[in-house]
Image (cartoon, rainbow, N blue to C red):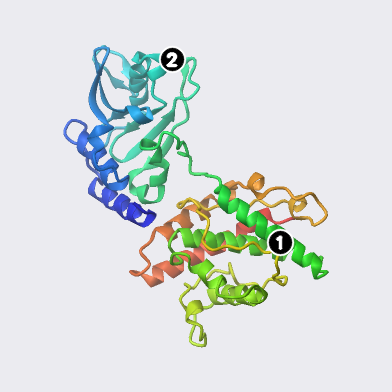
Amino acid sequence: MNDKEQIKAAKKFSANWNRRGDERSDTQNFWTTLLNEVFGLNKPFEIIKFEHRLAGHFIDAIIPSTKILIEQKSYGIDLTKKYLQSDGALLTPFEQARRYYCEFNYTERPRWIITCNFQEFWIYDMHNAEDIDNFYPEPQIIKLEKLNYDYKRLNFLVDPDDDNVKPEVQISKAAAILIEKIRNAFIDNYEENKQTDYNDSLIKICIRLVFCFYAGDSHIFSDNQFFNYINRFPIKNRNEAIQNLFSVLNLRDRSNITDDNLKNFPYVNGGLFEDKVTLPAFNKNMPRCSTKPKILTGTLFTLQFSAQCLSPFSARKTVAQAVCITPALKIFIKSLTRFFSMNFTNDLNRRNALISKTALIFSANCKMILPR
Protein backbone atom coordinates (compact mmCIF):
# COMPACT_ATOMS: atom_id res chain seq x y z
CA MET A 1 0.00 0.00 0.00
CA ASN A 2 1.21 3.51 -0.71
CA ASP A 3 0.81 6.44 1.68
CA LYS A 4 -2.30 7.75 -0.01
CA GLU A 5 -4.04 4.39 0.24
CA GLN A 6 -3.07 4.00 3.89
CA ILE A 7 -4.32 7.47 4.78
CA LYS A 8 -7.64 6.73 3.11
CA ALA A 9 -7.90 3.32 4.80
CA ALA A 10 -7.02 4.77 8.21
CA LYS A 11 -9.66 7.46 7.83
CA LYS A 12 -12.28 4.85 6.90
CA PHE A 13 -11.26 2.62 9.81
CA SER A 14 -11.56 5.52 12.26
CA ALA A 15 -15.02 6.40 10.99
CA ASN A 16 -16.22 2.80 11.19
CA TRP A 17 -15.15 2.41 14.81
CA ASN A 18 -16.03 5.87 16.06
CA ARG A 19 -17.57 5.80 19.56
CA ARG A 20 -18.20 2.07 19.70
CA GLY A 21 -16.54 -1.24 20.52
CA ASP A 22 -17.16 -4.12 22.94
CA GLU A 23 -14.16 -6.07 24.17
CA ARG A 24 -16.01 -9.40 24.10
CA SER A 25 -17.63 -9.22 20.67
CA ASP A 26 -15.53 -6.72 18.69
CA THR A 27 -11.87 -7.23 19.62
CA GLN A 28 -11.01 -9.70 16.87
CA ASN A 29 -12.80 -7.74 14.17
CA PHE A 30 -11.18 -4.47 15.28
CA TRP A 31 -7.61 -5.73 15.20
CA THR A 32 -7.81 -7.96 12.14
CA THR A 33 -9.48 -5.15 10.17
CA LEU A 34 -6.76 -2.73 11.28
CA LEU A 35 -4.01 -5.12 10.20
CA ASN A 36 -5.72 -6.02 6.95
CA GLU A 37 -7.15 -2.75 5.69
CA VAL A 38 -4.71 -0.19 7.10
CA PHE A 39 -1.47 -2.19 7.10
CA GLY A 40 -2.17 -4.43 4.13
CA LEU A 41 -1.84 -7.88 5.71
CA ASN A 42 -3.81 -10.38 3.63
CA LYS A 43 -4.01 -12.98 6.40
CA PRO A 44 -3.90 -11.16 9.74
CA PHE A 45 -5.03 -14.25 11.68
CA GLU A 46 -1.67 -15.79 10.83
CA ILE A 47 0.21 -13.26 12.97
CA ILE A 48 -2.24 -12.17 15.69
CA LYS A 49 -3.48 -14.64 18.29
CA PHE A 50 -6.58 -13.98 20.38
CA GLU A 51 -7.46 -15.31 23.83
CA HIS A 52 -3.93 -16.59 24.27
CA ARG A 53 -3.78 -18.89 27.28
CA LEU A 54 -0.83 -18.39 29.61
CA ALA A 55 -0.43 -19.54 33.22
CA GLY A 56 -4.17 -19.81 33.75
CA HIS A 57 -4.90 -16.41 32.19
CA PHE A 58 -6.38 -15.49 28.83
CA ILE A 59 -4.58 -12.61 27.15
CA ASP A 60 -6.81 -10.62 24.79
CA ALA A 61 -4.29 -10.69 21.94
CA ILE A 62 -0.62 -11.15 21.19
CA ILE A 63 1.46 -10.67 18.05
CA PRO A 64 4.48 -12.95 18.59
CA SER A 65 6.40 -11.87 15.46
CA THR A 66 6.62 -8.27 16.69
CA LYS A 67 6.52 -9.07 20.43
CA ILE A 68 3.26 -7.27 21.25
CA LEU A 69 0.79 -7.90 24.05
CA ILE A 70 -2.65 -6.28 23.77
CA GLU A 71 -5.04 -5.64 26.64
CA GLN A 72 -8.36 -4.64 25.06
CA LYS A 73 -11.12 -2.79 26.88
CA SER A 74 -14.56 -1.68 25.74
CA TYR A 75 -15.36 1.78 24.46
CA GLY A 76 -15.73 4.23 27.32
CA ILE A 77 -13.33 2.45 29.68
CA ASP A 78 -10.83 4.80 31.30
CA LEU A 79 -7.36 3.38 30.61
CA THR A 80 -5.91 5.16 33.66
CA LYS A 81 -8.45 3.87 36.17
CA LYS A 82 -8.01 0.83 38.43
CA TYR A 83 -10.59 -1.95 38.04
CA LEU A 84 -11.42 -4.88 40.31
CA GLN A 85 -9.89 -8.17 39.17
CA SER A 86 -11.16 -11.69 39.82
CA ASP A 87 -8.61 -12.12 42.63
CA GLY A 88 -9.74 -8.91 44.32
CA ALA A 89 -6.82 -6.76 43.17
CA LEU A 90 -7.37 -3.27 41.83
CA LEU A 91 -5.36 -2.79 38.64
CA THR A 92 -5.20 -0.43 35.69
CA PRO A 93 -5.32 -2.06 32.24
CA PHE A 94 -1.54 -1.59 32.00
CA GLU A 95 -0.97 -3.23 35.37
CA GLN A 96 -3.20 -6.09 34.31
CA ALA A 97 -1.18 -6.54 31.12
CA ARG A 98 2.06 -6.27 33.09
CA ARG A 99 0.96 -9.26 35.15
CA TYR A 100 0.67 -11.31 31.97
CA TYR A 101 4.00 -9.96 30.76
CA CYS A 102 5.74 -11.42 33.81
CA GLU A 103 4.37 -14.90 33.05
CA PHE A 104 6.25 -15.15 29.76
CA ASN A 105 9.64 -16.79 29.61
CA TYR A 106 12.25 -14.06 29.80
CA THR A 107 13.34 -14.41 26.16
CA GLU A 108 9.73 -14.40 24.95
CA ARG A 109 8.56 -11.36 26.86
CA PRO A 110 6.82 -8.74 24.71
CA ARG A 111 8.66 -5.60 23.72
CA TRP A 112 5.39 -3.67 23.61
CA ILE A 113 2.24 -3.55 25.71
CA ILE A 114 -0.79 -1.88 24.14
CA THR A 115 -3.89 -1.01 26.12
CA CYS A 116 -6.81 0.03 23.96
CA ASN A 117 -10.44 1.08 24.44
CA PHE A 118 -11.34 1.29 20.72
CA GLN A 119 -10.71 5.05 20.75
CA GLU A 120 -7.14 5.28 22.03
CA PHE A 121 -4.02 3.16 21.77
CA TRP A 122 -1.75 3.49 24.82
CA ILE A 123 1.65 2.10 23.84
CA TYR A 124 4.19 1.07 26.48
CA ASP A 125 7.77 0.24 25.51
CA MET A 126 8.98 -2.51 27.85
CA HIS A 127 12.52 -2.40 26.53
CA ASN A 128 15.03 -2.40 29.40
CA ALA A 129 12.35 -3.21 31.97
CA GLU A 130 14.20 -4.34 35.12
CA ASP A 131 12.32 -3.75 38.37
CA ILE A 132 9.13 -4.85 36.67
CA ASP A 133 6.82 -4.34 39.66
CA ASN A 134 7.75 -0.66 39.72
CA PHE A 135 8.24 -0.18 36.00
CA TYR A 136 5.84 2.40 34.58
CA PRO A 137 7.07 3.54 31.15
CA GLU A 138 5.58 6.74 29.78
CA PRO A 139 2.91 5.69 27.26
CA GLN A 140 2.70 7.03 23.73
CA ILE A 141 -0.94 7.74 22.98
CA ILE A 142 -2.53 7.51 19.54
CA LYS A 143 -6.15 8.57 19.17
CA LEU A 144 -8.36 6.69 16.74
CA GLU A 145 -9.78 9.94 15.37
CA LYS A 146 -6.27 10.96 14.28
CA LEU A 147 -5.20 7.61 12.89
CA ASN A 148 -4.98 8.93 9.34
CA TYR A 149 -2.24 11.30 10.59
CA ASP A 150 -0.51 8.88 12.99
CA TYR A 151 -0.88 5.46 11.36
CA LYS A 152 2.87 5.22 10.75
CA ARG A 153 3.43 5.30 14.50
CA LEU A 154 1.67 1.89 14.62
CA ASN A 155 3.93 0.39 12.00
CA PHE A 156 5.69 -1.59 14.75
CA LEU A 157 2.60 -3.86 14.72
CA VAL A 158 3.93 -5.44 11.53
CA ASP A 159 7.60 -4.43 11.42
CA PRO A 160 9.80 -5.63 14.31
CA ASP A 161 12.53 -3.19 13.30
CA ASP A 162 10.32 -0.10 13.48
CA ASP A 163 10.16 1.55 16.89
CA ASN A 164 9.30 5.11 15.84
CA VAL A 165 6.14 5.34 17.92
CA LYS A 166 6.93 8.89 19.02
CA PRO A 167 5.62 11.71 16.81
CA GLU A 168 9.12 13.21 16.43
CA VAL A 169 11.06 11.31 13.77
CA GLN A 170 14.39 12.20 12.24
CA ILE A 171 14.77 13.08 8.61
CA SER A 172 15.67 10.19 6.32
CA LYS A 173 19.35 9.63 5.74
CA ALA A 174 18.96 9.89 1.96
CA ALA A 175 17.27 13.29 2.20
CA ALA A 176 19.85 14.55 4.69
CA ILE A 177 22.72 13.49 2.46
CA LEU A 178 21.11 15.12 -0.57
CA ILE A 179 20.46 18.41 1.26
CA GLU A 180 24.03 18.35 2.58
CA LYS A 181 25.42 17.95 -0.94
CA ILE A 182 23.23 20.77 -2.24
CA ARG A 183 24.19 23.04 0.68
CA ASN A 184 27.90 22.44 0.18
CA ALA A 185 27.59 22.99 -3.57
CA PHE A 186 25.77 26.28 -2.97
CA ILE A 187 28.51 27.39 -0.57
CA ASP A 188 31.15 26.62 -3.19
CA ASN A 189 29.22 28.49 -5.84
CA TYR A 190 28.59 31.51 -3.63
CA GLU A 191 32.31 31.71 -2.89
CA GLU A 192 33.33 31.24 -6.52
CA ASN A 193 31.13 34.23 -7.31
CA LYS A 194 32.77 36.15 -4.44
CA GLN A 195 29.51 36.45 -2.49
CA THR A 196 29.98 36.46 1.26
CA ASP A 197 26.72 37.58 2.87
CA TYR A 198 24.66 34.56 1.88
CA ASN A 199 23.71 32.76 5.12
CA ASP A 200 20.11 33.93 5.14
CA SER A 201 19.54 32.99 1.51
CA LEU A 202 21.28 29.64 1.96
CA ILE A 203 19.09 28.66 4.89
CA LYS A 204 15.89 29.70 3.12
CA ILE A 205 16.88 27.75 0.01
CA CYS A 206 17.53 24.60 2.04
CA ILE A 207 14.28 24.96 4.00
CA ARG A 208 12.32 25.46 0.77
CA LEU A 209 13.99 22.43 -0.78
CA VAL A 210 13.08 20.29 2.23
CA PHE A 211 9.51 21.54 1.81
CA CYS A 212 9.58 20.56 -1.87
CA PHE A 213 10.96 17.11 -1.09
CA TYR A 214 8.33 16.63 1.60
CA ALA A 215 5.57 17.91 -0.68
CA GLY A 216 6.61 15.47 -3.37
CA ASP A 217 6.69 12.54 -0.97
CA SER A 218 3.33 13.55 0.51
CA HIS A 219 1.51 13.92 -2.82
CA ILE A 220 0.93 17.66 -2.73
CA PHE A 221 3.21 17.64 -5.76
CA SER A 222 2.65 14.86 -8.25
CA ASP A 223 5.18 12.05 -8.34
CA ASN A 224 8.67 13.40 -9.16
CA GLN A 225 7.09 16.69 -10.30
CA PHE A 226 9.78 18.83 -8.65
CA PHE A 227 12.71 16.80 -9.97
CA ASN A 228 11.21 16.38 -13.43
CA TYR A 229 10.82 20.15 -13.64
CA ILE A 230 14.41 20.89 -12.56
CA ASN A 231 15.93 18.25 -14.81
CA ARG A 232 14.30 19.80 -17.89
CA PHE A 233 16.90 22.54 -17.76
CA PRO A 234 20.62 22.45 -18.47
CA ILE A 235 22.76 23.23 -15.43
CA LYS A 236 23.45 26.80 -16.50
CA ASN A 237 19.71 27.59 -16.53
CA ARG A 238 18.72 25.97 -13.25
CA ASN A 239 19.24 29.10 -11.20
CA GLU A 240 16.53 30.85 -13.19
CA ALA A 241 14.35 27.71 -13.18
CA ILE A 242 14.35 27.48 -9.38
CA GLN A 243 13.72 31.21 -8.98
CA ASN A 244 10.75 30.90 -11.35
CA LEU A 245 9.40 27.93 -9.43
CA PHE A 246 9.69 29.66 -6.06
CA SER A 247 7.88 32.68 -7.52
CA VAL A 248 5.06 30.59 -9.00
CA LEU A 249 4.55 28.63 -5.78
CA ASN A 250 3.80 31.98 -4.13
CA LEU A 251 1.46 33.08 -6.95
CA ARG A 252 -2.30 32.58 -6.81
CA ASP A 253 -3.11 34.03 -10.24
CA ARG A 254 -1.39 31.93 -12.91
CA SER A 255 -3.06 33.59 -15.92
CA ASN A 256 0.22 35.14 -17.11
CA ILE A 257 2.22 31.94 -16.73
CA THR A 258 2.78 30.31 -20.12
CA ASP A 259 4.80 27.30 -18.97
CA ASP A 260 2.35 24.50 -18.13
CA ASN A 261 5.02 22.71 -16.11
CA LEU A 262 5.04 25.67 -13.73
CA LYS A 263 1.29 26.19 -13.82
CA ASN A 264 0.69 22.66 -12.60
CA PHE A 265 2.44 23.27 -9.29
CA PRO A 266 0.01 24.12 -6.47
CA TYR A 267 -0.24 27.56 -4.95
CA VAL A 268 1.55 27.75 -1.56
CA ASN A 269 0.38 30.85 0.27
CA GLY A 270 1.37 32.14 3.67
CA GLY A 271 4.78 33.59 2.89
CA LEU A 272 6.93 30.48 2.68
CA PHE A 273 8.06 31.40 -0.85
CA GLU A 274 7.40 35.12 -0.62
CA ASP A 275 10.92 36.53 -0.28
CA LYS A 276 13.24 36.36 -3.24
CA VAL A 277 16.50 34.68 -2.31
CA THR A 278 19.88 35.12 -3.90
CA LEU A 279 20.89 31.98 -5.75
CA PRO A 280 24.45 31.46 -6.96
CA ALA A 281 25.08 30.29 -10.49
CA PHE A 282 24.74 26.53 -10.92
CA ASN A 283 27.79 24.66 -12.13
CA LYS A 284 29.35 21.22 -12.09
CA ASN A 285 29.39 21.26 -8.28
CA MET A 286 25.63 20.78 -8.03
CA PRO A 287 24.56 17.16 -7.36
CA ARG A 288 22.47 15.46 -10.01
CA CYS A 289 19.03 14.32 -8.82
CA SER A 290 16.81 12.18 -11.03
CA THR A 291 14.20 11.21 -8.43
CA LYS A 292 13.08 12.46 -5.05
CA PRO A 293 14.67 11.09 -1.88
CA LYS A 294 12.33 9.06 0.27
CA ILE A 295 11.17 11.08 3.27
CA LEU A 296 8.82 9.46 5.75
CA THR A 297 5.36 10.95 5.33
CA GLY A 298 3.37 12.25 8.27
CA THR A 299 6.00 14.33 10.02
CA LEU A 300 7.74 17.57 9.13
CA PHE A 301 11.48 17.26 8.82
CA THR A 302 13.33 20.50 9.48
CA LEU A 303 17.03 21.10 9.25
CA GLN A 304 18.52 22.50 12.43
CA PHE A 305 21.33 24.65 11.02
CA SER A 306 23.58 26.40 13.46
CA ALA A 307 25.58 29.51 12.71
CA GLN A 308 28.77 27.48 12.99
CA CYS A 309 27.41 24.79 10.68
CA LEU A 310 26.62 27.32 7.96
CA SER A 311 29.71 29.46 8.30
CA PRO A 312 31.83 29.25 5.16
CA PHE A 313 34.93 29.37 7.34
CA SER A 314 33.96 26.49 9.64
CA ALA A 315 34.38 22.78 9.21
CA ARG A 316 31.43 21.40 7.30
CA LYS A 317 29.40 19.29 9.65
CA THR A 318 27.10 16.71 8.15
CA VAL A 319 23.47 17.72 7.92
CA ALA A 320 22.51 14.25 9.13
CA GLN A 321 24.12 15.07 12.49
CA ALA A 322 22.26 18.37 12.72
CA VAL A 323 18.71 17.20 12.02
CA CYS A 324 16.01 17.47 14.65
CA ILE A 325 12.48 18.67 15.21
CA THR A 326 12.15 21.53 17.67
CA PRO A 327 9.25 21.56 20.18
CA ALA A 328 8.07 24.91 18.86
CA LEU A 329 7.34 23.31 15.48
CA LYS A 330 4.90 20.73 16.85
CA ILE A 331 1.86 22.84 16.00
CA PHE A 332 3.15 23.26 12.48
CA ILE A 333 3.87 19.54 12.20
CA LYS A 334 0.28 18.70 13.13
CA SER A 335 -1.18 21.31 10.79
CA LEU A 336 1.07 20.39 7.89
CA THR A 337 0.34 16.70 8.36
CA ARG A 338 -3.37 17.50 8.23
CA PHE A 339 -2.79 19.49 5.07
CA PHE A 340 -0.83 16.74 3.36
CA SER A 341 -3.47 14.19 4.38
CA MET A 342 -6.37 16.08 2.79
CA ASN A 343 -8.18 15.23 -0.40
CA PHE A 344 -7.22 18.37 -2.31
CA THR A 345 -9.94 18.05 -4.95
CA ASN A 346 -12.82 18.51 -2.53
CA ASP A 347 -12.50 21.79 -0.68
CA LEU A 348 -10.18 24.38 -2.21
CA ASN A 349 -11.00 27.09 0.33
CA ARG A 350 -10.23 24.80 3.25
CA ARG A 351 -7.03 23.69 1.58
CA ASN A 352 -5.83 27.26 1.01
CA ALA A 353 -6.75 28.31 4.55
CA LEU A 354 -4.84 25.39 6.01
CA ILE A 355 -1.72 25.84 3.93
CA SER A 356 -1.77 29.55 4.76
CA LYS A 357 -1.87 28.72 8.45
CA THR A 358 0.89 26.12 8.25
CA ALA A 359 3.15 28.28 6.13
CA LEU A 360 2.77 31.20 8.54
CA ILE A 361 3.60 28.98 11.50
CA PHE A 362 6.54 27.58 9.55
CA SER A 363 7.76 31.07 8.73
CA ALA A 364 7.47 32.24 12.34
CA ASN A 365 9.24 29.25 13.79
CA CYS A 366 12.01 29.20 11.22
CA LYS A 367 13.45 32.19 13.09
CA MET A 368 14.42 29.77 15.81
CA ILE A 369 16.82 27.95 13.53
CA LEU A 370 18.39 30.92 11.78
CA PRO A 371 21.83 32.07 12.90
CA ARG A 372 21.60 34.87 15.45
From the image, tell me which residue sits under label 1: 185
The CA span between labels 2 and 1 is 55 Å
Q: Residue at x 67, y 54 (%)?
A: 369
Viewer can see residue 23: yes
Q: Is residue 110 above or below residue 201?
A: above
Disc 1 marks a residue whose amino acid type is Ala
Front residue (pair 359, 226)? 226
Question: Circle 1 — which element?
Answer: helix
Q: Residue at x 37, y 27 (%)?
A: 67
Question: Quick check: 20 left or right of 365?
Answer: left
Q: Is residue 178 above or below residue 205?
A: above
* Occupied quadrant, residue 207: bottom right
- Of the image marks 2 and 1, the number of the one nearer the N terminus: 2
Q: Alpha-carbon neighbours of circle 1 within 10 Å: few (<14), some, or many (≥20)?
A: some
Q: Residue at x 29, y 41 (%)?
A: 35
In x, y percent, where is residue 162?
Answer: 45, 37
Disc 2 marks a residue whose amino acid type is Asp
In x, y percent, where is residue 221?
Answer: 46, 66
Q: Is residue 48 above or below residue 83?
A: below
Picture quarter with the C terminus: bottom right
Question: Circle 2 — which element?
Answer: helix
Q: Is residue 254 above or below residue 245?
A: below
Question: Quick check: 8 left or right of 206?
Answer: left
Viewer can see residue 197: no
In x, y percent, where is residue 75?
Answer: 25, 37
Front residue (pair 14, 264)? 264
In x, y percent, where is residue 288?
Answer: 61, 63
2 or 1: mark nearer the eye: 1
From the image, tell me which residue sits under label 2: 133
Q: Are marks 2 and 1 in contact (CB under 8 Å)?
A: no
Question: Quick check: 351 left or right of 55?
Answer: right
* Occupied quadrant, residue 273: bottom right
